[in-house]
Amino acid sequence: MERCPTSPSKRAQTHVVPQGAHTAAVTVDERGVVTGWSDGARVLLGYAPAEILGQRAARLLAEPAGGAWREAAGVPRWSGTAALRHRDGHRLDRDVLVHRRPCGDRPGGREWQVVSAVTGLPPAAAGRPLGEWAFDQSPWVAAVFDEGLRLVRATAGMQRTLSLAEGTMRGLRLTDIAPYEGSAEAESGMRRALDGGGTQELRLRLDPAEPEHDWHVRIVPLADSAGRLRAVALTARSEPSEQLVRQRMLLLSEAGVRIGTTSDVQRTARELTDVAVPAFADICTVDLLDTPRPGGFVFRRAALRSAPGTPPLPHLSGDVLHCPPWSPSGRSLAEGRGAVYSAGDAAVTRWAREDPRAVAWVRESGVHSVMAVPLRAAGVTFGVALFGRTRRAEPFDADDLWLAEQLAARAATSIHGTEQAVRQHTTTMTLQRGLVPRRLPEQAALDIATRCVPSAGRNGTGGDWFDVIPLSGTRVALVVGDVVGHGTRAAATMGRVRTAIRTLADVDLPPDELLSHLDDLSDHLAAEDAGAADDTDDEAADGVGTTCLYAVYDPVTRRLAAARAGHPPPAVVTAGAVRFLDVPAGPPLGLGGMPFESYETELPEGSLIALYTNGLLAPGGQGIDDALGKMFAALARPAQSLDSVCDRVLTSMLTHRPHDDIALLVARTRALHADRVATWELPFDLAAVAEARRLATEQLAAWKLAEAAFVTELVVSELVTNAFRYGRPPVRLRLIHDDHTLTSEVFDSSNTAPHMRRAHTFDEGGRGLLLVGRLTRRWGTRHAGTGKTVWAEQLLSED
């Protein structure tokens, strides 16, 4: 016989037995050697682990191993009486259970585990009292009747079903306790069992007032030690009648119509409680998961309802509830399945004892049966519905649990869909707000006010946006655009287009060239998204069909240059008259192959410019002519501030939340007059560099900017020198002074752009632009049709 090897560490190891289990457990390998010894075995036979581990098990037997042990060796499990020898020598006859199982240390090896109950159990947990307690507290409907058919014992389930205490019923017959036709039929079954008829199976309707319930009754005769029939045990299980089945199906059908009628989460939760109470339960609450926390869950009550006559619950809708993980709600959420509890279950009593919030549920309301059902949809559990019965005597059963789960699933599907739409809308709004500038940049060319109005549709926010981009020479670019479609992907596409515009604007491209480059980029984005698109995704995400208006205003010349790609033209107000600027209508972005044209005009100082998206002109219930008339009238009226202009336009044109997003930008032009701009034509000669420095220094003195003279001299000297060395005539120097910045510009007719490079140790040049970059806030090159302008911008001190 092969022996299972035992490691040295295992020889000194005893089986771990839970405290208070009082079970003797011994492990014996195939050679008959003891390899495991529990604390219960030490109590039963007196051997310490060190005295018996590694010894042969035969020394534990009071009689030689006979046929019974050989029989045990050949079967997976054996039970019987064994004569054991205590350490002090006395004999013990014990009932033992023997399991033959694989040896954990060697594949294919076998060992035996012998278990037996330990003698000397504590009186509170042993013998007849424990059995009596178990019978008393059993939730099942059961009772014992004597030979006279008088009740002797009744379980807690029986007492609850009949709404009578055992002391009240003891000594009475069932026909006295429940004087119904079904009770008499049950007594006839009891008499047949006592007369030797054996176990009786009956299907009865005990209470005519409850036609929805039938009872499956089982009656078993009980004999004493002499074999005489002395009593009967009656057990009953409630079964739904055909009428109850029809009621449940009607309730389920009603739930399909009444639950989930709107996209409001709170209303859906109330609809669940309205369907459940009073037709199905006496109390119902719906709690949605707020935030998990260590040691429990945090719920926010969404709805509750109690049947008339039931004590009101103290926690109203909106209250925050903390539930421990072992409570019915906590277990339901953690395990993701429903469960039925009686008021006497350990989890419920502990809940009522340790959580003050549960007292109203368990004690004050008089609830005797509770169901906790999770709200689960799309693999996510996000809440719990609790159902309770107080007035109805019958507890919830498995069929009730199934029905509750169907009701909860209906509500959960609606709530999850609503929350998903809300989350998507919130995500889109957050994304859009993050991409639209929260604070407008500082600039001296325009006074600006803006508004963004999200749509009221359920498809989510769209891709409308605006932007204000400071350019060189105190110029400012104004952008308004609209990405077709709604939702997160439309907002993300808007972000990509907006980023591309800012990048192209930094190169100082004219409006028509910028839109041409943007159109090419939209083609590339469309091709990329077409290859990765999901056929089921109906959101526009590639930028095709995006409209955009790009305009640049120069406060020195007071000229506005603009180009548009499928976008409505800007409106301008001068001297109280409103008109559209005649900007050529280019195609929307992404169509490709068609040119864009710029439009230029000179605007008087104080002119009003309005840029907007087409959502402003298309609110429901009015034609385009009426919308334009209202917008023109609102723009023409004098206003103290641009914010008032924006509010007036929106108030006059919108009677309700629009079906499309609206972006509105209103700007009032400023002008930099001749006293803030100085321009000189320089002879094309390196000797003129000194003259340029002198002219700049004198002009700064006239502007009272002497503190900026040193840096300005260095910048002007470098820019003019580069123009003479690498450019072509004519060469012009221009200084622009606004409130906070000083811009130095040098123009020449060459299109060759300067670039910063790293000079080597013995190079005579190459360090000028590096110096300019270090001394100024920013610098760059602006190209025109012929020639270029190199500029550098200094930030002036507030003094």
Image (spheres, rainbow, N blue to C red):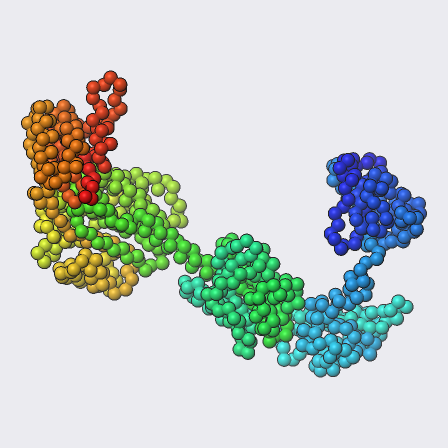
From the viewer's perspective, tell me whether residue 157 is left or right of residue 443. Answer: right
Front residue (pair 733, 423): 733
From the viewer's perspective, tell me whether residue 99 is left or right of residue 315. Answer: right
Give the x, y percent position of residue 349.
Answer: 64, 65
- Is 232 rendered above or below residue 608? below
Give the x, y percent position of residue 141.
Answer: 71, 70
Give the x, y percent position of residue 418.
Answer: 42, 59
- Is 770 rendered above or below residue 65? above
Residue at 71% in and 76% down:
165
Front residue (pair 335, 246): 335
Q: Quadrant of residue 792?
A: top left
- Spot the residue most to the top: 762
The quadrant of the picture occupied by the C terminus is top left
Q: Is residue 94 visible?
A: yes
- Is 334 rendered above or below residue 218? above
Q: Quadrant of residue 27?
A: top right
Front residue (pair 558, 653): 558
Q: Quadrant of residue 121?
A: bottom right
From the viewer's perspective, tell me whether residue 75 is left or right of residue 291. Answer: right
Residue at 53% in and 64% down:
385
Front residue (pair 428, 797): 797
- Is 295 rendered above or below residue 226? above
Residue at 56% in and 73% down:
282
Give the x, y percent position of residue 1.
Answer: 84, 36
From the viewer's perspective, tell me whether residue 285 is left or right of residue 28. Answer: left
Residue at 83% in and 76% down:
147
Q: Is residue 403 visible?
A: no
How many badges with numbers are in the image? 0
